[in-house]
Amino acid sequence: MKGALCHELEVQVDASELWEVFSHLKLGQLVPQLLPNIFEKVELVEGDGGVGTVLLCTFAAGIGGPRHYKEKFVKIDHENRVKEAAGVEGGLLELGFTYYLIRFQIVEKERGSSIIRSTVEFEVDEEHKTNASLASTDIVAVIGEAVAGYLLEEKKKKGEALNS
């Protein structure tokens, strides 16, 4: 069974600022800081942040399901602001998913406004097809909201510092 889910979030942040976070390892550094109730830590397993980089994500205690998830960056398109990471170990792959890919696309609307388009693509083997309902955009949506909020707060702090 194959499927795809999409979530769009409009934010008042420049696309270039968002892409600066989403396209690099900074996202993995920020996520546990911004969302400690979901992510305990994100560790670099191999790579430098480019295609082929592997991260080990550890979910916070109390989150149901598998505690660990390894993902590999399979696409980073700076021109179109698209980043894709495929699950390679743990997470939903332990529950019958044979493929799980997360895509973030940063779409510029107008100066100071963007859309974070988060897509989850998945495949579940026939034996576990009832687990397909576990695929969700909830976490990627929360990540988008948290990063946008962080960037807005940082911008506000810089503005206040300049005015002091």
Image (tube, rainbow, N blue to C red):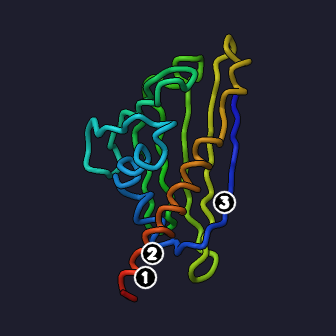
Verify CB contact (< 8 Å) between mark 2 and mark 1.
yes
Circle 1: residue type: Gly
Q: Secondary structure at mark 1?
A: helix
Who comes first in sequence, dot 3 or dot 2? Answer: 3
Check disc 2 and report the residue beneath it: 155
Identity of the residue drawn at 60% across and 73% down: 12
Q: CA distance from mark 3 to mark 2?
A: 19 Å
Check disc 1 and report the residue beneath it: 159
Q: Which quadrant, please, contains the N terminus?
A: top right
Check disc 3 and report the residue beneath it: 9
Q: Secondary structure at mark 2?
A: helix
Instruction: Give the x, y percent position of residue 68.
Output: 43, 25
Q: Is residue 103 above or below residue 159?
A: above
Task: Tell me if mark 1 has few (under 14), some (14-19) or many (20+) residues whose alpha carbon lies within 10 angstroms of its own.
Answer: few
Q: Nearer the viewer, residue 126 or 148?
A: 148
Instruction: Give the x, y percent position of residue 91.
Output: 50, 25
